[in-house]
Amino acid sequence: MTTRQSHNVLLDLSGPWDYRLDPDDRGMPEIWSAQSFDAAPFELPGTTTTNHVGHRLEADTELNEDTTRCLRQRYDYLGALWVQRRIVMPPAEALADGVELYLERVIFESAVWIDGHYVGRRDSLSAAHVYDLTPFVEPGREQTLTIRIDNRDVEHIYDKASAYTDETQTLWNGIVGAIELRAGAGPVRDVQVFPRPSDGSVHVLLRGVAQSATTADVLVRDAAGETVAESHGVAVHAGDNGIDVVLPHFETWDEFHPTLYTLSVIVDGRETDVTFGMRELSVDGRTLRINGNGMFLRGTLDCCVFPKTGFPPCDVASYEHIYRRVKEAGLNHVRYHSWCPPEAAFEAADRLGVYLSVEGPFWMDDWFKGDVGSHIDHYDYIEAELNRIVDAYGNHPSLCMLVAGNELSGDYTYLEDVLTRIRKRDPRFLTTLTSNSGCIVTRRQPTAADDYFVDVQYDETGIRGQAFLDEMVEQTTLTYDEAVGKASLPLVAHELGQYAVFPDVSEIPEYDGALAPVNLEVIKNDLERKGLIGYAKDYVLASGHLAAVLYRDDIESTMRTRGFGGFQMLDLHDFPGQSTATVGLLNAFWEPKGIDDIDLHCDAVKPLVILDKRQFVAGETLTATLKVFNYGADDIEAGRWTWSLDAVDARSDAGVGVPAVHLEGEVDAAAAPQGDLTEVGAFSVPLDCFTSNTKARLAVRHPGLGVENSWDIWVYAPEPARDFADDVTVSDRFDDRVRQTLERGGKAVILADPNKVAKARKGEFFPVFWSPVWFKSVDPCGMFCDERHPALRSFPASRYSELVWKDPIERSFSIVIDALGGAFKPITQIVPNFYTIEHATNLFECAVGDGRLLVCSINLDATDSPSVLALRNSIVDYVNGDGFAPAQSVDAATLTALLNPPAGAVVPDHDEKPNLALRKPASTDGSKSKSRGPEHAVDGSPLTFWESINSLPGHWWRVDLQQEATVSRIEIDLQEPQDTELTIDGSVDGSSWTTLAQRREQAKNRVYDIEPQPLRYIRVTYVQPSTIGAGMTDFRVS
């Protein structure tokens, strides 16, 4: 029976049990079930870890791929565990309906004996293990109950799914929920309620009615206990029976009004109670509907992350805490990634109005070399497990979506057949085969069993911001209309976000339970060893701020797409596995990290403005189209919306004197019907009142509804580029001219060249995706600055990285300044990723003897960008003025080592070795972002590179030499050694191509010597394994 159906607990079996470990599988052949165990207390509910049983953790303290993988059980054990207890059975009068053993949450297989007599085995990872003990029980007598638990992969589902993995909840062994003897079901084995709000009725399915039953009474009561519907004396027969009950008056269940009812079925004087909600789900073209209203999924994931215990809680309060966090963020939906939560989760979601998507405990795809159907056990277990989920939790209105698993590949026909049978048997849920296609080369297509489609793309068109990063942040126009136009069913963006936040090592004391934060501890050790532990919180807040900005923009792009089904972000909270993927705005305990200055604006009703850009020059006019995303409870009538534009520049706190600006107006808006995105009006704002470089906030509100949204924009004063004064020595390295200037107490500026510093990193605005170890990367995770420093006086910077910094960062490289020590505070600080912890900057100053030096690795000549121009002029004014007075000192020897190539380094000199492709126009069929555009393969920098938009095969890159030239050699440097096949074609006119070379090899540096011939255009096509993205750091032609 589903919980919330009444059950009579005869005996609570929680407490101490005797136990034996069985690592060598001796228990079955030696018939331990007939033996008495020595007294060795093992507390249940609990696990081997919580009982300090198994192999004690001995963790490495060094930062490496293994130690940063995930949290670790303090005691781990994989194998058979036997537990035993002597219990006095209930008296005969309590056993009139039989007796069941109820074991909630077991990994993986349990087997049960009474007094040595075998009862049976169960292996569900999703539902309780229930045994009928009636034939074995002797009322009133003491008997021995023995349970064998095996946490090995008994059904060959592999170890990646959240239900069965060490990455998150861990492969614990034990029983973690209720352990009870319960009275049997009585005259009705099971009651399932099928609400039909569309016709005001419920269909009640009575399964397994006993032979003795003749009639049934059905009552429906509201939360106050008042009867709202009833049907008496309904004739029933042995087996399954259906009863229809009409509710004359009722309230539906949804995120806004989670109204619950209790249905009571009385047969042979025994009552069964079921809690349910009047909820009906449907699909109307590309629109999801709940009770006839449009529904947009605003969701996050839960990957079974419970660091205190290493296993999911089974109490309602724990899930209410989680769902309150979800609702506080404006979300309405939780996707249970490759696992199903216990009963308590559904009960909490029922109460709070949260839409749950539950997946079977399966993650089998191309990446992990074991897909659906790769083992014969899959063909029984997958269907059986999904049916167990439906039978156990189907009465809960919060169970809205049923999915076979995460990123599945393999036998899709089997999965379609399974879900088709389940849908026919139980139509209360929406279904889809898998969350995201697990087959990367050939993306799956929708089937008849897909009510909606969850993926990162549809028909090779992206449906989340990762495919359109520049457009996502630089304007507010990004939509997925192209993909929606190709689809005939609702699309839901899969695992939106995954923006890495630097791990918060201050959380370590919170890990006082079953799991040890080995990954956080080695990161903390590395910070301490490098003298950077003092910046740890800054790293968290700066990277978290950037992640929040990107999450918000990513989410809003889905809401701007009419006919879209929703999003499932990864993640509102941290994922501590898969190489420490701390991508959350909340930590792994669902608690805030302090990133509270960004509102995700995920509410059901949201005004949206469409802006072609978010950076303006004073004197321009901001022109906005106003749309209303309305997936609230009701239509919004035509009426007044207000807008305002206010200067919110952080520098005003420092007394910089940013002029106050406040503009406001109204829009006489059209109506916005429920369940749609509607254009309701437009407005324009002249920006001529801005007289200095300013950050401003555009806000739109509905005065009557209390609904609002806001966007940061930047307005720059029109001004020419200014130059450093004649008394300022400018160089690209710490050379003799700079040294002599400083020795005589003068001022110098180094506009650094990446080829001429000791250690440099590419400037990146967007942070690491997921984890720098899981997807190997040396990229940073944002930056922070001293926003009150006088060098930034006229630059409208906030402390943390946001759009104003994008152009400067992407036109920069970072100088690694470890040699200056952690105590040295530059003007800007790059947030490293946790696996490449370095003290790095793109702007710092210091006193050198009596001289003053400023070092900048941002290309200040890129004045086509208004933000770079503003930064350039701010720095120039500072250095030229009297206020240039660095507070920190560095000696000349240290700077010489830092700002010159290491001894023996080869510095590229393109004049001596001419590269015909250097800085020539380059193009491609798609780049991941502007910072990884095609021009970066020929820009002469060792740090920049071109990267394709995705990892599908067939991407091309080409260069135009701008005139015919005789070519005899082509050299290509990939980002890393890759087993890839490249095709090199040449052309003189750009339309007729000749293949110059084609081969597959495992190498980073490729050299192609060809027959000398005249060429103007050269094209490289990547024909390669699909998991390797196309790209190159350097392309040379001679």
Image (cartoon, grey):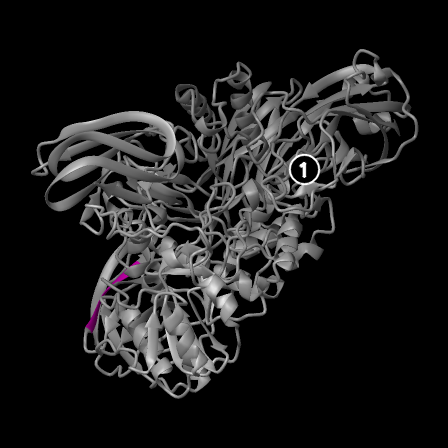
Asked whether residue 706 appears in the rendered view, the answer is: no
Instruction: Name the residue that disc number 1 marks.
Output: 6
Residue 990 appears anywhere in the view = yes
Quadrant in which residue 325 is drawn: bottom right
SS for dot 1: loop
Please tell me which residue lies in front, 823 or 768. Answer: 823
The number of numbered discs placed on residues in the rendered structure image is 1
Q: Which is more toward the observer, 745 or 651?
A: 745
What secondary structure characterizes most of the magenta part?
A: strand
Position in image of residue 837 (x %, y %): 54, 55
Measuring from the top left, give residue 240's x and y in whole percent: 55, 21
User: Which quadrant of the rendered structure holds the N terminus?
Assistant: top right
Residue 186 x/y as whole percent: 69, 26
Crowd band around label 1 with a 10 angstrom C-alpha radius: few (<14), some (14–19), many (20+): some
Residue 991, by quadrant, is top left
Q: Which residues are magenta?
A: 621-628
Q: Up-down: is 624 above or below 887?
A: above
Residue 643 left/right relative to 41: left
> Which is more toward the observer, 72 or 233?
72
Where is residue 698 shown, x and y percent of the image?
Answer: 32, 72
